[in-house]
Structure formats: C-alpha cells, structure tokens
Image (cartoon, rainbow, N blue to C red):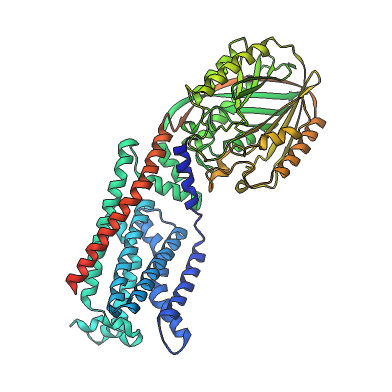
Amino acid sequence: MTKTQGDLAALSRFVFRAPDWSASLFFALVLAAVVGVAAFDYQFVFDDAYQGLVYVGIPTVVAALLTPWVDQLLGGRMTHNRSALLALLCEVIVVVFLVAAAVVALGTDLGQTFVFDVLLVALASIFAFRLFVIMAISRRSLLVAAVPASIQTVVAAALLFVYSGTLRYLEVGGPLVRAYLAQPQDAPSELLIIRPEDFLVLAGICGLYALAVHGFLVTIDRPWRQSLGVSVLDFIRGFIGHIAEGSDELETFFEGLGEEAVVPVTVMGIRRADGTEKARFVLPMIHPGPMGEIGGGNLPERIARSAEGLAFPPHATAGHDFNLVTEREVATLVDAAEDAYGHIEYATEATPALREQEGESKLLGQAVGEDALVVATHAPGFADDVDFGVGLSTASEARGSGLRNVMLVDAHNCNNGLEGDDLGHIVPGSQRSFDMMAAADRLGKRLAEADRGDLHVGVAWDPTDWEPEDGIGPLGVRVAVVEVDDQQTVYVLVDGNNMEPGLRKELLATIDADEAEVMTTDNHVVNTMEATNQVGEAIGADELVALVESLVDEAKADLEPVEAGMAVEHAEVTVFGNDRTETLASTANAMVQIGGAFLLVVVGAAMAISLLIFLLAG
C-alpha cells in the first residue's frame, strides 16, 4: 500500500454502519420532543413536547418511511435504514439552524421574522442535502431524485401552511377547506407571521440549491470520468453501501475499472502415508483486498474452506493493483488451486531450511523434491506489499539453479502502519527488489545442491476468540512444524494484515526450533473500519506469544512421516490493473481536498443569493 492508497483507506474511519431504522426514528422523536419543550411555552410540558413532535417529528417520520418507497418506485436503491438515518440527520440540521437563529435573535433586534427566514433556509438546505445523498445512492437524474429528496421539506412546509393559517390570506375555499387547511388556533403564535409569498421564497431557494448541488456534482465528477471513465457517484454509493449495510455495490464500480490478468496459483500438498491430506499451502499471486469481503478481501478463508487438510494461505508477492474486482473471481482461483492440487508429484524427502540475506531482504527456504517453499521478510525494517513483477523476478532467480517450482511467500510481518512518507511498498528498481533477487539466486543454488532427508510434518490450529476488529481474521493462528534430519522449522501463519514492529521478534524468541518464520495472510476483512489494524495493534503481544507457543508444542506432538509436492496452474481473472489503484486513490484524495474547498464556495454563494432573495422579498 502506498502513501496515497493509505490516505484513501483512512477515509473509512469517517463511515459507520447505518443503525436499524426503528432506532433512528426513536431518536428523531425524542429529539423532536426535547426541541418542543425548549421552543414552546404552553401551560403543560407535555403540550410543549407534543408541539415538537408535530412540527419537528412528523416531517422526519414521514420522510423516513416514505422516501424508500418513492425512491424505489422511481428505480432507486434507498433502503429503510439509510432513509431513517438521513431523515434524522436532516432533523438535526434544522434544529441547529433554529437554535443558532434563536441565539442571534435574542441578542439583536432581528426578532421572530429572522428566525422564520432561517427556518426557510434550513428546509431548503435539508432538501439540497437529501438531493445529494439520493443522487449518490440511487444514481437518478436531478429531476427524478428531487421527488424523494423533497419529501421532508414538503411535509414541513405543509404543516406550516395549515397551522399558520396562511389560507386566511387567500380568497379561496369554503368552510370545509378552511376547517382542514387553516388551523391557526391550534398553533404557536410564532407561526402566525407566515405569509403566502414565504412559500414561494422557499420554492425559489430550493430550486437555487438544487442547481448548486447539480453544479457541484458535475464539477467533482469530471476528473473521475476523464481519468478513470467512471462516475464518482458510483464510488460513493458503493463505498457507503458496503460499509453501512454490507452490500456488494462497490464491486459493480470496480468492474468498470478492471483489467484481465493471468496469475500463477501455486499449491503445495502434504499428505500422510495412507494418502489423506494433512495440510495444503495455497498461494494465488493475488492481493487479498481491497477491504472487507469486497473483491478478494476474504480470499484466505475461501481458500481454507476448499482444502481437506489444514490450509495455509499466506500472502503472495502482489500489491493492490492485483485486487480482484469481484468476489466471484475467487471461485476461479479456487478452481485453479484444485487443478494444481490434482497434478502434484509427491516426494518423501526434503532439505533442511536454509537462510540467505542481502541488505534488509531475508529469505528462508526449504526444498521438497525438486520444488521449494521460500519465505521473504524485511523485518525489522518496515515493509508492505511486494510488487507483482518483483515477485516473479525473485522466484525466477530462485529457480535458475534447477528448482522446478518455487512458492514465494511475502511474510508481510513488520510495518508501521500509515506513518511516514514511505510505507515500504517494494517496487521494481528499488534497492530491496535487487536485494531479494540476489538472495533468491544464492538460496536457489544452495537448495538445489543440499542433501535431502526424510520429511516429517505436524500442524496445529486455533481459530481464537478474536474478531476482525481485533486484527485477527476467521482463520486465527496456524502452525506447521517441518522436521528433516532432526532439524525443526516452524512456520506460523496469523490471519491478519501485517504486524506491529517488534512483534515478529517476540514470537520468534519464544519458538523452540532450529528455524522459524512468522507470516500473515494480509486478510482484508480486518480493514472494514480501520485502514491498518495490524496484528498486535489491538491485542496484547503476550496473549499471541502464549498462543503460538502452545500451538508449536501441539504441532510437534503431531509430527509424522509425510510426502509433499508442488504444482502451479495459471488463472485468468479480472483485477484492478496496473496503476489503476494509485489513480483511483489519487483522484479520490484530490476530490476530498479540493472538493471540500469547492463545497464551501458553493455553499457560500448559495447562502449569499438566499440573503439577496430575502431582501428583495421583504
């Protein structure tokens, strides 16, 4: 992950899951009652609360319940949870406007007319806010989206019309009409200043704000269409939908960005003497992102479910450009892994584990027959993803001395989150890329020439009680102990996204073995609400150390003679594509920075014109 991609991922902290619609309506009614008690001065407090429920609560409830029905009738996607939350937010906006106006009116000579003028601006503002949100979620045209967006404002205006007695200004209607559409006797005296032309002013301001929303959206959407060929509204709708309600709308957006790619899927099978599978290492050269279960975000768990034995799906050498665009693509990789598993040629002998280092690049390798498992790390240096091209070149260097297949794992086990300008992404041309290739070349030669011994393997697994919010995915912690000629090598796999600095060292210090390495899956289910959430960030190191220590003992007790082998298949999948992730991140970050300033300009201009309208109308 680059710094730009990290800034984009960090935006997830501003998004939260939408509460159930009933909870939003409950808080809306409580707020309306409190506002009534504060604003009105009847003889009994319950009368004050009732007035608040009528004038503040009813528009909110009607908008919350009616908006999804109207929006979906017009082809939109507004849900009841989102609608209720939107109505509640709009109610809060109106209350804030009125409280501010009341404070100003008390300290000046502006009086009640000023408060009512502010109310009109507030009602127009919530119309504009609802229009923006509905256009983003439902992707309707301005005129179509204006229908559900206007519900809360129209209901509030209708109540003002009826209870202010505005009809008395109009020479229309007989006794029956006046009986139902003019109820000034039941309304607070503050509403009796309303005139028919005030509603024309409200309509004019709403039209002005609608044009402002349209202009704002067109302006911020242009860079997206020019650089990516997609709309920013599709991104906003998908992002909010995934975080707020777990929808897969974001995948539809990503499909518009995707490019076809051919990726290796490497499988190392380990089976007992009776032919049953004991363990399986599976490494699709894909990045398990972008977040949550979108795309390949939960790739490790899907791979684990497909194996008969205990599955180990470590992190491959691939960055965010190789995120799958949809979850459907995961099935293609699982099928390729099954095909590779069926073509494995097994051997009963392996080499002891060997290490090579060049600069900060450290490689631990172990050959089984003519194949090899190689794990790369840069700890204690900070590192994130290894570029796809760097991984291919490094594996090729390791094969240069006669090895047939090489499973190159990015241990992904030491980083400092999103701090600093360089997040440790290892790209072609960097010093670390050349260091990895040099170390792989020497390691491949040593493994090809090393003596072989009988292979014994033991495994252990604990799904743990930790949740993705704790930085641990559903696969928990898995351990494999490989014994060759009395040398024991321990491979620890934690289902998480990278590790806090120093944690790998603590874990290795407690493992009783000749060689050991700690890996993470880079599972992005832990990144739904946090941009980093690394292993060790939320949970105590002592707890994880104790768990790994017990699992190593359990895996040693499970040691038995096995045979193992490796095979590779290639899968055609749709990924984000070269530089598309960086382009998306750069465009989104620019939209946030420039769009915020532009929004202030648009709001300021709209408010200034609103003031001019009030002056002319007055």
The number of numbered discs placed on residues in the rendered structure image is 0
Q: Position of residue 482 (x, y in %)?
A: 75, 25
In the rendered structure, the answer to whether residue 510 lies left or right of residue 267 reads right
Q: Nearer the viewer, residue 610 or 577?
A: 610
Question: As displayed, is residue 25 above or below residue 602?
Answer: below
- The residue positioned 34% from the left and 71% from the top of the image is 155
Q: Quadrant of residue 367?
A: top right
Q: Quadrant of residue 97?
A: bottom left
Q: Quadrant of residue 307?
A: top right
Residue 292 percent across, percent down from the top left: 53, 43
- In the picture provided, is 406 more to the left or to the right than 130? right
Above or below, comparing residue 193 to residue 315 in the picture: below
Residue at 33% from the left image edge and 40% from the top image edge: 224
Residue 17 x/y as whole percent: 51, 55
Task: Classify 167 as above or below 327.
Answer: below
Q: Let me know if residue 583 appears in the view.
A: yes
